[in-house]
Image: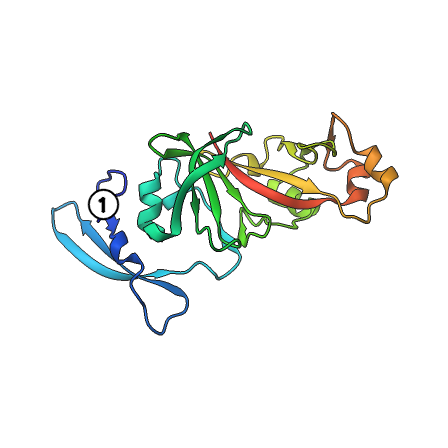
């Protein structure tokens, strides 16, 4: 079975049936696949390529290639192998569940959950969520990133929802910074977590149904770090 990408002037296709073929002597590969390509002149070629296993960290997630805004579940299966993609209900941005896919479900450090704008046909991603132990990062931001890391990547301070409750510590507004526009119509979402060493009094000062600037002295003193993050598509 050949899984095809979205139409393009030059079409490259990975044959999923070959994607998991044994690649002896190369522990960094999932196996081999066949890239079938037709150029602008109609010349056809097939090339056997090694499919790299994305274990070299940190893995930089970008809203391009298999994760472009117009991608589909078929595209992702073509890149990673059908055996590495599992269909099921995933959490949508509004908190509800909808049909989606889990990529690399057996590897928590690399696993991704993808919710779709069209959950029936599994096309056009709405959100990609990462695990709490993920090896992926976005624009250099990963699990455990500090306020300083986030401000540096964003290019400016941002606003955080007060701690406490399900949405506590969620970045409420990047204030027009770089993390609000990752390219490809994507924005970073992040929820910050407090260390167990932060005192009750300090937590109280930064909790409740209001937002705080990341440069607020009370927020800086608490020094929260990224506990979980995701990517939203426009």
Q: Residue at x 82, y 45 (%)?
A: 198
Residue 179: horizontal and vertical position, in percent? Answer: 56, 38
Q: Residue at x 69, y 36 (%)?
A: 169
Asked whether 153 or 8 is in front, the reply is: 8
Q: Residue at x 24, y 54 (%)?
A: 35
Q: Dividing the picture into quarters, in which one does residue 100 lie?
A: top left
Q: Dividing the picture into quarters, in which one does residue 156 lie?
A: top right
Residue 158, compared with residue 34, is above or below; it is above
Residue 54: horizontal and vertical position, in percent? Answer: 44, 58
Residue 213 is left or right of residue 218, and the answer is left
Residue 69 is left or right of residue 214, and the answer is left
**How many labels sit on residues?**
1
Residue 56: horizontal and vertical position, in percent? Answer: 48, 62
Asked whether 159 or 143 is in front, the reply is: 143
Residue 155, compared with residue 82, is above or below; it is above
Q: Which residue is mark 1?
A: 11
Residue 2 is left or right of residue 104, and the answer is left
Mark 1 Cα-neighbour bin, 10 Å: few <14, some 14–19, many ≥20: some
Residue 87: horizontal and vertical position, in percent? Answer: 39, 41
Asked whether 205 or 15 is in front, the reply is: 15
């Amino acid at each position: 079975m050949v899984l095809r990408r979205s139409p393009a002037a030059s079409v490259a296709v990975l044959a999923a049936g070959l994607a998991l073929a044994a690649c002896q002597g190369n522990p960094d590969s999932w196996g081999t696949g066949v890239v079938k390509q037709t150029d602008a002149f109609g010349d056809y070629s097939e090339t056997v390529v090694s499919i790299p296993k994305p274990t070299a960290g940190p893995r930089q997630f970008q809203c391009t290639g298999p994760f472009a805004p117009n991608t589909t579940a078929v595209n992702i299966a073509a890149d990673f192998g059908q055996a590495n993609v599992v269909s099921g209900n995933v959490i949508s941005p509004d908190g509800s569940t909808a049909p989606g896919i889990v990529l690399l479900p057996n590897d928590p450090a690399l696993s991704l959950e993808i919710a779709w704008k069209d959950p029936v046909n599994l096309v056009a991603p709405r959100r990609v969520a990462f695990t709490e132990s993920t090896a992926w990062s976005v624009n250099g931001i990963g699990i455990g990133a500090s306020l300083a890391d986030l401000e540096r990547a964003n290019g400016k301070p941002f606003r955080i929802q007060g701690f406490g409750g399900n949405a506590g510590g969620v970045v409420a507004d990047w204030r027009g910074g770089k993390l609000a526009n990752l390219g490809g119509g994507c924005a970073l979402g992040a929820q910050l977590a407090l260390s167990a060493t932060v005192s009750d009094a300090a937590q109280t000062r930064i909790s409740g149904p209001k937002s705080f600037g990341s440069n607020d002295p009370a927020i800086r003193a608490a020094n929260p770090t990224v506990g979980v993050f995701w990517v939203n598509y426009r």
